[in-house]
Image (tube, rainbow, N blue to C red):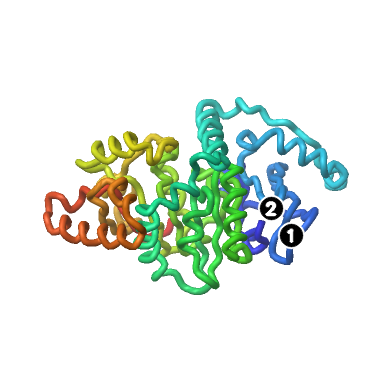
Amino acid sequence: MHKKFIPFLKSPVLNDSDESTLEMFEFESSDADHIKNGILLCRKSGNWFPVHNEVLELIRPELMYPDDRKKFYEKYKDKFAELGIKYEAESANSGGDSVKNQFEQRSHYDDFAVDKSHNYDDYAMQPFWQAMDRKVFGEWKTKIKDGNMILDVGCGNGRSAGRIYKENTFLAGIDISKKSVERAIESSKEKGNYRFQTFFIADADRIPFKDGTFDFAVTSGVLSQLPDAVKTSREIQKKLKKGGIHFGMENNRSVFRIFFDFLTNFTKSWKKNKKGLTPEINKKMLDSWFDKGDVEILSYTSVYLPPTYYNKMNPEEALSKIEKTDKTIQSFPFLKNNGGLIIFEIKKIKTP
């Protein structure tokens, strides 16, 4: 857990109107910048949130990993006693269907993160996605400046973090899957970026940062997998500074969607996707999610041929072919908005 982000954190158990007071108690450090083991204590509610092997679990108690939480308490029982904190088990059933659905989603991506046969690392290395990531993240990175703070929502294995990160910026990635967060930390260390990054467990519907913290936020293929894409999108806007931008890339709701999905499923090129309640998004939907005047939305669609076609090429060839095809088809107004992907920027222009 990177110490720089601690002053910006907010307890997920408090209401939006409550002033969050989180205190860090460090048990072990990894280095000068990162905490290896410790707890964040919310004085107002009495809740504590563990940092175990650099992974902070800043989520409502009913959504925590109960077995890991109990083992952590037992390991540091003496330190908890010094702080006057007693262990209280949370019921996994509290919270109703919403919590149940999140447990199911989390279990799916925990398994996926460590599946040696097919996981996000394999997915990210497909020529099509290497090409699109180079194109889209390359465009976004031109807007990021020194000292900016970036929020990666649904960070997964750290794919987006690795592509959007620039030197002299700070990035925080959140995900509901612990195994995914652990992989993101590992990937960040491999790339040499970890000095300026942190990744932890959190709920995208209740992002535990103070409002107005970030200059930019990014979601890549995330909104389509969430229980409530509208709620998460609005939550992201709250965490941005005025003028901050939410960068996003999602499946586009288009006339080609059935064709794309059929070929993807037929070739088994992406066999483990777990869709949420909003599997595709288009510009009209994005406009309807926000009050007029609160945001400015820019978007375009891309990719008019199935990804399986581009996966037969190397990434450079795939990118060249995507750009040429986009240019040709976008010259026809009735096809322009029907690409397979929608790439968008939601700029915050009004604060409450």
**Type of amino acid at the residue the image marks with label 2:** Glu
Image quarter (top left, top right, bottom left or bottom right) of the C terminus: bottom left
Q: In this view, does 324 lie above or below 119?
A: below
Nearest the eye: 263 or 213: 263
Image quarter (top left, top right, bottom left or bottom right) of the N terminus: bottom right
> Considering the numbered disc 1 on the image, is that residue within a helix, a strand or a loop?
loop
> Considering the numbered disc 2 on the image, is that residue within a helix, a strand or a loop?
loop
Where does residue 124 sit, x and y in percent of width and height? 44, 51
Q: Going 42% across and 67% down the picture, which residue do you hit?
A: 141
The total number of labels drawn is 2
In this figure, which residue is indicated by the disc labeled 1? 30
**Type of amino acid at the residue the image marks with label 1:** Ser
In this figure, which residue is indicated by the disc labeled 2? 54
| Tags 1 and 2 touching, CB below 8 Å | yes
Can you tell which quarter of the image residue 12 is in? top right
Q: Is residue 317 visible?
A: yes
Q: In this view, does 216 lie above or below 265?
A: below
Q: Going 58% across and 56% down the picture, which residue do you hit?
A: 187
Nearest the eye: 117 or 251: 117
Left or right of residue 273, residue 3 in this image: right
